[in-house]
Amino acid sequence: MRDGGRAGVLIAFVLLLACAGLVGYGLLDTEDEPKPAAGPPTAAVTYEVTGDGTAEISYLGQDEDGGATVVRDAELPWKHTVQVPLGETPTVAVVLGEEGGQASCTLAIRGKHVQRATAMGEFGRATCAGPLPADGD
């Protein structure tokens, strides 16, 4: 029985050592997860294209390369809100197809109407743009 008692003590010691190791790891690993770097400040921009049929729409939104997004054969009416970096010029352009027709683009920055333009006829084009302040005002 004496060997059984030693085995029990040895097992208890090993378990205690394992628990202490886990607690120690938890105490040492208290660093917060790195927070993602904050991007540039942005403003909400709403692009809207009204009309009938389809059109090609391109607009500036926040993406990795800062380029325009193109939506081919967009069903009208179409509306999209994106975040645009301050200091940029949000722009939406509409191009009608060979069937022509009429479509209007509008641009609103932080909910305030900025510009409206109308495209008419075969391959008609319209562009709406408005500057964003660089400082967030």
Image (cartoon, rainbow, N blue to C red):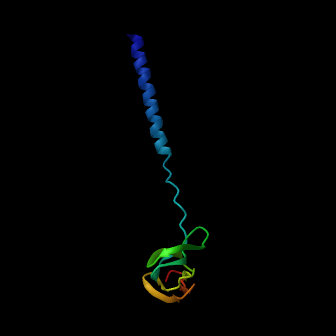
Q: Residue at x 45, y 77 (%)?
A: 78
Q: Residue at x 54, y 88 (%)?
A: 121
- 53 or 11: nearer the viewer: 53
Locate residue 63, reporting x and y percent: 56, 69
- 51 or 136: nearer the viewer: 51
Residue 130 at least partly seen: no
- 51 or 81: nearer the viewer: 51
Q: Is residue 53 above or below residue 118?
A: above
Q: Is residue 33 above or below residue 48?
A: above
Locate residue 25, reporting x and y percent: 49, 41
Q: Is residue 111 above or below residue 2?
A: below
Locate residue 10, reporting x and y percent: 44, 21
Q: Residue at x 53, y 61 (%)?
A: 36
Quadrant in which the N terminus appears: top left
Locate residue 87, reporting x and y percent: 57, 80
Residue 23 at least partly seen: yes
